[in-house]
């Protein structure tokens, strides 16, 4: 009798221990899955370094996308998607700092990624590399402004009829670009007075989520922008006990936490020079994107005339409603049906409060309207690429 009782206790303790171990295993698995989901496609795109160009075969119907800067890599997945949809293979040359910008991109055999560590590496072999570039059907020069033009000249791509120039700001190109505009060889991210608008807002497999219980805003830091009003609004919302947090990303060397009051540390999560994986994860887990463009700030005026804020790509790519000043909204085709628009600094607080209190049904309606706009923009961008391809 005592033996049976002892056996039952042993079995019971074993069962409890077994269940605890299983639970720990499952929790660890889910934690691992959650924290590595943004690395899921890293090894699905063939990757190599710059020298691999000299030892590989270039397939027919292949475009080379070249990004010489240590930034702007977030545009590469979007441009790649357009050309894959048009039946092209895509070879990419970019700085190694951006090699995880494809972490959300679906598995594909159409892309080969090549990275460099320093532009000197390319310049030292410019003559030989120019011979390889000639084998490509198309060449997309993703950052085309004055500092890069000398390198493009060394690579002998300026006068190639199959080269396309991406201009991020009309004020950064000189009068020599007039010939490229006339030939439909200039791509712009916004609907500018000239150039073909092609907005690269595709990042990969995106999860469309319901609104968080604890509202999460996303903000990218931009140098020479005034964050005083924004900080005052956050302080007011905090004093009124609203449940929210704001993730702030900064990729410039000028960015420090000193731009924001220390008493807001519990509400502001500041990230310095984070990877694209972390960047994407922060956007995807957020509810809204805040754009602090100010019509009274002369540094911000170009964002409604000659250049585009990168937040627009994030808005369309991740379907996150944007909070923006009315004077800039029209330039980006934004309205009260797909965005939260404020009219002045005093109204900024009201819109932030509205964003926090908005019910999930209304929030999802904003996302659905954004999706309609996204599809229209994608179709327009694809047709503009076709204009280049059919220009002769």
Image (cartoon, rainbow, N blue to C red):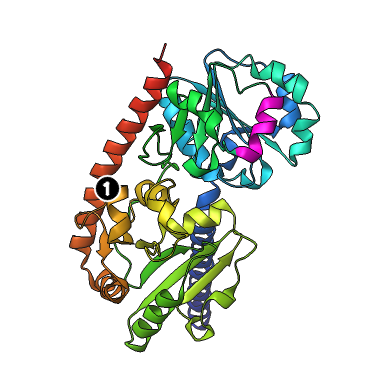
Query: Can the viewer see residue 68 in this picture?
Result: no
Residue labelled with disc 1: 333
Predominant SS along the magenta part: helix
Where is residue 189 shown, x and y percent of the image?
A: 42, 40
Where is residue 331 shown, x and y percent of the image?
A: 31, 49
Where is residue 83 shown, x and y percent of the image?
A: 45, 26
152 up-or-down from 234: above or below: above
Observer-nearest of 279 and 289: 289
Q: Is residue 316 left or right of residue 220?
A: left
Observer-nearest of 94 and 28: 94
Report the span colored magenta: 146-155
| Quarter occupied by residue 118 | top right
> Few, some or many C-alpha atoms within 10 Å of disc 1 (few <14, some 14-19, many ≥20)?
few
Q: Is residue 278 magenta?
A: no
Secondary structure beneath disc 1? Answer: loop
Q: Is residue 200 left or right of residue 113?
A: left
Q: Seen from this angle, which residue lies furthest right?
A: 124
Observer-nearest of 1 and 380: 380
Where is residue 121 shown, x and y percent of the image?
A: 78, 35
């Amino acid at each position: 009798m005592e033996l049976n009782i002892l056996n039952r206790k042993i079995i019971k303790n074993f069962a409890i221990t077994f269940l605890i171990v299983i639970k720990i295993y499952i929790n660890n698995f889910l934690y691992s899955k959650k924290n590595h989901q943004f690395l899921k496609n890293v090894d699905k795109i063939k990757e190599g370094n710059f020298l691999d160009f000299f030892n590989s075969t270039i397939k027919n119907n292949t475009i080379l996308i070249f990004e010489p800067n240590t930034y702007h890599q977030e545009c590469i997945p979007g441009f790649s998607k357009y050309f894959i949809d048009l039946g092209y293979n895509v070879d990419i040359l970019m700085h190694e700092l951006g090699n995880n910008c494809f972490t959300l991109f679906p598995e594909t055999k159409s892309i080969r990624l090549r990275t460099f560590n320093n532009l000197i590496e390319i310049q030292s072999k410019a003559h030989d590399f120019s011979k390889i570039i000639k084998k490509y059907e198309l060449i997309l020069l993703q950052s085309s402004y004055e500092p890069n033009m000398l390198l493009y000249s060394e690579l002998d791509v300026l006068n190639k009829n199959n080269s396309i120039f991406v201009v991020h700001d009309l004020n950064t190109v000189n009068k020599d670009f007039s010939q490229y505009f006339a030939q439909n060889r200039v791509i712009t991210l916004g609907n500018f007075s000239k150039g073909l608008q092609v907005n690269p807002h595709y990042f990969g497999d995106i999860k469309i989520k319901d609104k968080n219980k604890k509202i999460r805003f996303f903000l990218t830091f931009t140098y020479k922008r005034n964050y005083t009003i924004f900080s005052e609004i956050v302080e007011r919302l905090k004093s009124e006990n609203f449940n929210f947090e704001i993730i702030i990303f900064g990729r410039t060397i000028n960015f420090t936490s000193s731009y924001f009051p220390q008493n807001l540390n519990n509400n502001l999560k500041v990230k310095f020079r984070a990877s694209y994986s972390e960047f994407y994860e922060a956007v995807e887990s957020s509810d809204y994107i805040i754009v602090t463009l100010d019509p009274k700030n002369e540094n911000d005026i170009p964002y409604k005339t000659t250049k585009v804020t990168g937040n627009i790509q994030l808005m369309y790519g991740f379907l996150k409603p944007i909070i923006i000043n009315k004077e800039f909204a029209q330039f980006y085709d934004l309205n009260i049906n797909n965005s939260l628009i404020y009219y002045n600094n005093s109204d900024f607080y009201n819109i932030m409060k509205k964003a926090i209190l908005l019910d999930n049904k209304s929030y999802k309606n904003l996302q659905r309207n954004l999706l309609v706009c996204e599809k229209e923009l994608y179709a327009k961008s694809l047709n503009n690429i076709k204009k280049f391809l059919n220009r002769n």
